[in-house]
Amino acid sequence: MQNEPTCELNSKEEAADIYCSTCKTPIRAFDKLFGNHKDHEVTELTNAAEIAKEEVHKNMCKLEEQIGQMENVASHLEEIFITVEENFGRQEQNFEMRCNDVMQTLAQRYEEKLQDLGEEKKLKLEALYGQLVSCGKDLDTCKDLMETIQELCMENKKVDFIKAAVALVDRLEKFLKKDLDLELSTLPDFEDRAIDFSDMEQLMDSINTVPDDSIECYQLYYKQVSDDTPSEEQAELMTKVKETYHTVTHLVPNTQYEFWVSALNASGISPASERAVYVTAPSPPIIKSQESQSCENAALICWESGNINPVESYTVELSKVTNGENGDVITESIVGIPNCEALIQLQPRHSYLISVRAVNMGGSSERSEPVSIHTTGTYFYLNEDSAHPLLSVLEDGFTIACSEIENPECDLPSRDNSFTRCIAILGSMIPFQGKHYWEVEVEEDMEYRVGVAYENTHRQGYLGANNSSWCLRHIVTPSRHKYEFLHSGTTPDIRITVPPKRIGILLDYDNWKLSFFNLDIAQHLYTFNSHFQHYVHPCFALERPGFMRIHNGIAAPTSIALS
Amino acid sequence: MSAIPQQLHLRTDYNLTLAALGAETPAPAKIMALKQISSNKCFNGFQKVFEHDSVELKCKMKFGIYLPPKAESGKCAVLYWLSGLTCTEQNFITKAGFHQAAAEHGLIIVAPDTSPRGCNIEGEDESWDFGTGAGFYVDATEEPWKTNYRTYSYIKDELPKLINANFPTDPERMSIFGHSMGGHGALILALKNPGKYKSVSAFAPICNPIQCPWGKKAFGGYLGSDLSKWEAYDATHLVKSYPDSHLDILIDQGKDDQFLSAGQLLPDNFIAACTEQKIPVVFRLQQGYDHSYFFIATFVNDHIRHHAKYLNA
């Protein structure tokens, strides 16, 4: 077997095996060491591929957004198009109708007036004719008298003359006493007849307005509708509105409302319109950030609905935070979540802001207050509900303490879920596949148990004494430190010469292992090979007064991750 | 051709000496370092056996060497296995079932023989626990053993040099483990050479030879009656003066091991000493297991993983 010192450089392939971030191109590692890229930044090909993928994905998301917006605009335009046609149609009809009314009324008036004029003329002419006839008669009489007078004057016989003259003077006196109507009975001028256009004016004006121009205002009514209370009991609210649109505020979220309108004018109020039913969007949910959990690859978020009545579904929104920025840019949305919890896949060693919206028929709520998730490692919280009465959790939430123990099985008040004999506490379940890591810190003379257990592990039992729990147990005997690795009450016989003060615990669901390490010297202590049937909870117990500090949400040290 | 000078028999590199002497044509028999005896492909690597002329032991010595697939393209760390009483270079490579783990972790495994062979020393074949097959990994000081029975120096110096010169190894990354007498060998080599081995482990080691029958017989024969010479090869004793260098020791011991109950192994003494000195040890007493290769085969993967953690870090 030959051993050439340069054998590692004689690679047969020319393929690129590393990525130069400075030149943004894949290169051979050889070139980084000896070539043009000596001083450049390099990164693993998989890394570079990941980054490129992310870029593409980001841009794809933006593109999707744009597509959505443009489709929206297009459909709005269509709607407006149709509405324009409708409005035109209505206006046209309206004009036609009004104009026809006006024309008809005008024609009517014309006829009437014409008729009146005709009547007047007839009267005038008749009067004049009468007067003329009468005048003619008088004229004839006058002429007749005149002739008589003339004849008289020619009469020589004095006796006849006097007789005739007396008769004539008598006739003349009678005639002259008569009132001669010399006044003109009729003036040639006609009455001033203006056509009464007053109502015409109204009609003319109405050409330019929509039929309901005469409305003074509208009355908008609304009322809550709910399945439980009969509708009569709900208060009816009303607002007066001038326009044909109105925004109603201060409504109760996630509630059904009925709306109806009446029009009001001088003559009174119209009948009510048909009732429209709308549902208000829900209130935003409230994330239970204390109970939210994460590991390197996933997070489990729980929340309260934020609404008294049920909603249809929930939407979870994620923002990946880079360098403390981009907290507002939503990188991912998960819709249609039926319950108040979601298991979300994430990338390791990133920070995220996660928020939730509630969704119902009326739309989606405002975004909830976000919860911050860091995928630095597996994170769980201690379930104080499960703690033995003598075990307390300190303020930091991750240190457990036990005070003097007289009788751990004494009749202290305990909750249903708490341990009664073993002074133990469970952490929250770790519901994610893969590997999970956490640490505990103990004093050298502490007696404790630390490990994992199923949710239903016997609360009356001791950790490790049954088949639903696995733990490392440390006790101090007069001669030495004793370590047990307990499951189903049995332990292998293991001696450990250096008592660990910091213990690393590695849970590997994929390979069904639970391993313990002395972190100070990176020493592997023991591994359970156990096919976990369910997800487990970390568990901790103290057998002597003292403290145990728990660290989680951290990455396993490399030496342990490789084990 | 000039006569080959005496210098060649000293503990020096053949080639260097020859170059210094200006020899032109090396005699094949002495200079060809290794002769391959066998080669079998195994888990995509190769289990080979070589023979060479040992300077320390002054005889032909065989060793097994497993080259993992990784060795074809790069340098690998080396894990030395020391076998127990009566074993040769064959036992471990045929019975222990370590190849898959070695291939997976990319480790070269070297398994030398347990004593010099064919030296024709009187009495060497009289017992199975002294002489042939029972080198005890010491440098003998007593006749007739002192010329050939230098297995301590062989394992410490000659063999690593030979391996590093002929195989793709990383000379800085080396660990050691063994069984029974080989466990004793591994422990003392690690304790006497702080920093030389990245990790050490053992199966049923003889932990305190000066207190057990085997040890007393072997040390008496190889080292004479001076107890101080014995202590220099006793792990329990060596621990007491081990400087604080990081060492992580894994020991597996079968609970049903007849030699344990016979008081040959004495692990409790070793553990007590390590506890006192704060040397990290994980000692596992394995229920139902005996002293055989079946026991070794069961836990060898754990040991390889233990060493890989330090060798591949």
Image (tube, coloured by chain):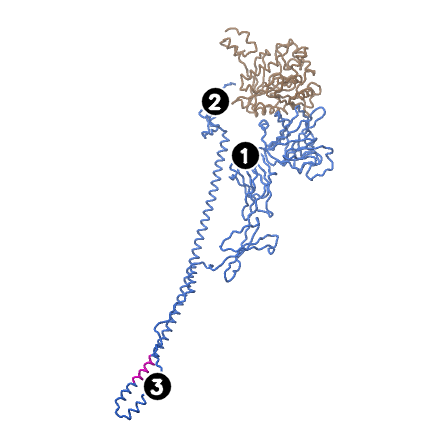
Q: State the residue position of label 3.
A: A174
Question: Label 3 neighbourhood size at 10 Å, few (<14), some (14-19), many (20+)?
Answer: few
Between circles 1 and 2, the one closer to the viewer is 1
Element under disc 1: loop
Region of the chain picked out in magenta, as a range: A132-143
The residue closer to the viewer here, A333 or A371, is A371
Amino acid type, residue under disc 1 in the picture: His
Q: Earlier in the sequence, mark 3 or mark 2?
A: 2
x, y percentage for residue A226?
59, 52
Q: Amino acid at mark 2?
A: Asn
Crowding at mark 2 (Cα within 10 Å: few <14, some 14-19, many 20+): few
Q: Chain of mark 1?
A: A
Of circles 3 and 1, the one toward us is: 3
- Whether the magenta-drawn stretch holds residue A133 is answered as yes
Answer with the quarter of the image where residue B37 lies: top right
**Snapshot quadrant of residue B110:** top right
Q: Chain of mark 2?
A: A
Mark 3 residue element:
helix
Subunit of label 3: A
- Mark 3 to mark 2: distance in Å? 165 Å
Q: Colour of chain A?
A: blue
Label 2 element class: loop
For badge 3, the amino acid type reads Lys
The answer to which of marks 1 and 2 sits earlier in the sequence is 2
Can you identify the residue that label 1 sits on? Answer: A350
Between A191 and A302, which is closer to the camera in this rendering? A191
Write down the residue under mark 2.
Answer: A10
What distance separates the C-alpha of mark 3 from that of mark 1? Answer: 137 Å
In the picture, measured across the screen, residue A386 lies left or right of residue A299, that is right
Circles 3 and 1 in contact, beta carbons < 8 Å: no
Chain B tint as drawn: brown
